[in-house]
Image (cartoon, helix red, strand yellow):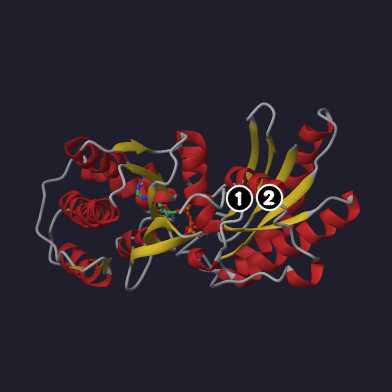
Amino acid sequence: MRVLGIEGTAWAASAAVFDTETDEVFIESDPYEPESGGIHPREAAEHMGEAVPRVVETALEHARSGGGVDAVAFSRGPGLGPCLRIVGTAARALSGALDVPLVGVNHMVAHLEIGRHQSGFDAPVCLNASGANAHLLGYHNGRYRVLGETMDTGVGNAIDKFTRHVGWSHPGGPKVEARARDGEYIDLPYVVKGMDFSFSGIMSAAKDAYDDGEPVENVCCGLQETVFAMLTEVTERALSLTGTDELVLGGGVGQNARLRAMLREMCEARGASFYAPEPRFLRDNAGMIAVLGAKMCDAGDTLSIPDSAVDPNFRPDEVPVSWRGTQES
Ligand code: ATP
């Protein structure tokens, strides 16, 4: 089976073709790059309107040599409403025109499932460290349960707010990673409450430290060390509480080498296995949508057009995990 995936929840207009026979994933992406500030929903939607047809055409051209596609999967949410609506409209039109089933994929579950698919892990805990989200997921009784999550902003968005304050262009995460290498650690507020965490206090403190003359390299170093230590602490607790010895990483912040090193070290210390997908599968991409779309389609988990509305607040624990055997709990 070959599945066309379409992604466009925020900044990445992306289309992919996943071939279940060969396990090959072809991805074509076109990122929205704001001229100033962060992601503007209207501008991002305009980008989707222009770029989605282009990336879909390239993906379909790739699929044509193999005989076309057997299903169309799309990101149904969570994400920016104006962007999601464009992706949903494109997916419905393509499913009708090609006369193939339509599959609605939860973007956050896709961030988890790509790691599970590639690692071969059975029921891992997942740390989703992305732009708009930050949470721990664990599988129990037919759903991915949210074991812990941010009480305010997503982790990438928090870092991007600091970098906007110092005048750096979006996205800020890679710039913080580069500058932190030359910095010395400074103390910043560490806020973990039970299984949840908060980034707003640390971001205000980082901005204040910078405004008070602390070298930006030191602020970047303190920021990374503190935020990633918070995520690693809660991840370790999630492994411990669930008795799981498999961890996968998802989301664009997962491209950060320091975060991966901390998680790997923690897993090694407790004898757990750790898997981080390669960067093109960590940041937003349609490959993960096509891969999960294929599993859902195989399980008969498809959508009728009237039931295919997008959902900007689609939580991962709302998704019945249709594609795993009922014997798994
Ligand atoms: P979501 O998946 O929750 O919808 P998103 O659409 O914002 O999030 P992602 O691609 O998962 O997109 O993540 C983008 C975020 O990743 C941005 O905030 C960016 O700054 C951050 N990021 C990218 N590279 C790095 C890095 N090397 N270190 C830290 N953060 C990074």
Tell me, for residue 299, which label it has, or none: 2
Up-down relation of residue 48 to residue 297 (above or below): below
Q: Is mark 1 within 8 Å of ligand 1?
A: no
In percent of width and height, residue 113 lies at 51, 47
Between 312 and 32, the one nearer to me in the picture: 312
Name the residue located 84 percent from the left edge and 50 percent from the top edge.
100
Residue 69 position (above or below residue 211): above
In x, y percent, where is residue 324? 56, 49
Q: Position of residue 61 (x, y in %)?
A: 81, 35
Let me know if residue 157 appears in the view. Answer: no
Q: Can residue 205 be seen? A: yes
Circle 1 residues within 10 Å: few <14, some 14–19, many ≥20: some
Q: Amino acid at mark 2?
A: Ala
The label on residue 115 is: none
Image coordinates for residue 281, horizontal then vertical, percent: 51, 41
Residue drawn at the location 36% of the way across and 69% of the way down: 153
The tag earlier along the polypeptide, 1 or 2, is 2
Q: Is residue 190 above or below residue 54?
A: below
User: 319 or 159: nearer the eye?
Assistant: 319
Tag 1 residue:
323
- Asked if residue 203 is positioned above or below residue 223 in the image, the reply reads below
- The three-letter amino acid code for the residue at tag 1 is Trp
Looking at the image, residue 306 sits to the left or right of residue 133; the answer is right
User: Mark 1 near mark 2, Cβ–Cβ under 8 Å?
Assistant: yes
